[in-house]
Amino acid sequence: MSARLPASSPPRWPRLLLLSLLLLGAAPGPHRGGAFYLPGLAPVNFCEEGKKSDECKAEIELFVNRLDSVESVLPYEYTAFDFCQASGGKRPSENLGQVLFGERIEPSPYKFAFNKEETCKLVCTKTYHTEKAEDKQKLEFLKKSMLLNYQHHWIVDNMPVTWCYDVEDGQRFCNPGFPIGCYITDKGHAKDACVINSEFHERDTFYIFNHVDIKIYYHVVETGSMGARLVAAKLEPKSFKHTHIDKPDCSGPPMDISNKASGEIKIAYTYSVSFEEDKNIRWASRWDYILESMPHTHIQWFSIMNSLVIVLFLSGMVAMIMLRTLHKDIARYNQMDSTEDAQEEFGWKLVHGDIFRPPRKGMLLSVFLGSGTQILIMTFVTLFFACLGFLSPANRGALMTCAVVLWVLLGTPAGYVAARFYKSFGGEKWKTNVLLTSFLCPGIVFADFFIMNLILWGEGSSAAIPFGTLVAILALWFCISVPLTFIGAYFGFKKNAIEHPVRTNQIPRQIPEQSFYTKPLPGIIMGGILPFGCIFIQLFFILNSIWSHQMYYMFGFLFLVFIILVITCSEATILLCYFHLCAEDYHWQWRSFLTSGFTAVYFLIYAIHYFFSKLQITGTASTILYFGYTMIMVLIFFLFTGTIGFFACFWFVTKIYSVVKVD
């Protein structure tokens, strides 16, 4: 088992640096020497069977989660496979985020006592008769899963059981999952995990990992109640064709299942467990060995530095416009006292009578702004909590639960912003406005999500949301979010319309012929490049965590990138807005929204590139699911970035026209 796996097989796992947390002034997450862990996750003490008490457990339960693959978007529950099943056992309760992400944690038949070693213990034996249709179907499903490299995910004491192995560059990688088995092609090529054992050599044959060597590492509690705390759980998958199935000894050749096999096939599932004390790892830092096994922090710092350079460049440009050009413009405009001077007006002052003219499709723009505000605040608060360590991978499903709950509760700002801007655009159909704010964007997302869910239902995947959860989501939307949106809209319409610093002329001014770079489309396309340049490296890790099933723990970096993205979207939009105003084009409202919102189009292009270059997804259903969920992310990102651009431009335009003397 000492063969090295190719470097392409382990996912690139990032880690969260303590420095990034210090930069954010955040409380420490699970890092070495931290004084506390995560709220709501208290340590569990274990002791030997003869010493157990109310404060000290003897039995260690191993739970199984869904099985997933990097070659398929469809995860499956453990019970969908013909593995050994637990008799009884309490299933842990799942939060909303876990259900939405398709996590299905079940009790397993693997149970052992603390510090009691087991060797080659039989769990169960599965027998397949290839002549029987039901057995053949189960076996074919197992083979297909091995072909697609589906991975087990086991949990001990709320901690992933990892498979650690060497990779080509001399590092040790710890994977929080291990494969069901592997396949040797009819040409003798070893696929996936089959490279770990030279005995896997039969052509057109599957090798199933029917034995695991589990090693539990523990740390004895120095103070407080007696007992020990588990700090790591590692395993090594093996394959044995047990010669004596009733009394297995874990020896002999590997368990092979030929594609041409017929008759009776017996698979005996066994395990061994051992314990080892580790005095170096504290309970609060027990996730570190996973996060540090594949450090890619240098890429993260490169990403941050790259983004900061773009921000500094844009800030310099905006500062130059604000302090030099605008200052000169305002001083020159305010010195024009005579009528002759006034007739020689030029540049952005010329359009002062049209700058606050209501845009076309003002209803739609105000609805987009309301939904965008809701997403913007939700993202900021979620990332802030994530930086404080509340939403770490140890707190399963917490990130998604937090985001959904915040979105539901933020209906009031959405309704208020939509109503305020719609009223300032001169709109009077307030009922339509509040209904569209409540249902348009959430409705598009829910419709897409529901269609994806139908496909998952059809495929029998664990990611399919149960009917009861769908009803609960609709109840949250209709019973909480919609009324809150109506309340926000009520207060928004009740307030006076936003006062503009200059009056709007009755007759719109004619816009002169524009040069190529000040035309709407080239400006919008150019505007999205710089914000996307700030995020595309971080985007790789986010897409990896979603589609390659890797743990995401870089919330410190992500929060910094979020702040940088907000600044970049604002500055790029202000810059282009100034150029358009100087060219006497006063249609800034939609253009400011679309300029920064176009970043979402680059996001979509990158997601398509990622699908074809990085993923090995096969099958029509998986492809449809990938692009279906990607479109939800693109719409959310479009509303989020577009809203930032509009607010920045609105502030800029209001500011510059409030300091110009206008007769």
Image: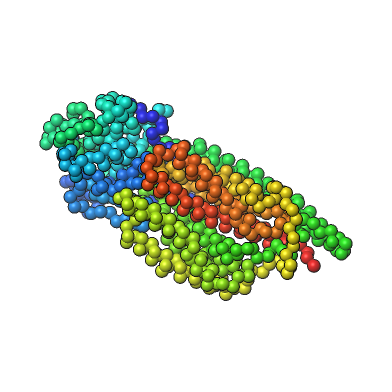
Seen as rendered, the residue at the extreme bottom is 494
Q: Position of residue 171 (x, y in %)?
A: 40, 30
> Quarter of the image containing the N terminus?
top left
Q: How many marks?
A: 0
Can residue 640 be spotted in the picture? yes
Q: What colour scheme has been applied to the protein in the rendered image?
A: rainbow
Q: Position of residue 185 (x, y in %)?
A: 31, 29
Left or right? Give the position of 263 relative to 638. Answer: left
Which residue shows up at 31% across the image and 36% down it? 147
Q: Quadrant of residue 280?
A: top left
| Nearer to the camera, 609 or 58 | 609
Left or right? Give the position of 534 relative to 467. Answer: right
Q: Quadrant of residue 368?
A: bottom right
Is 515 located above or below residue 300 in the figure?
A: below
| Nearer to the camera, 330 or 111 | 330
Is 36 located above or below residue 437 in the figure?
A: above
Is 512 located above or below residue 152 in the figure?
A: below
Q: Position of residue 84 (x, y in %)?
A: 20, 44
Which residue shows up at 48% across the image and 43% down it? 608
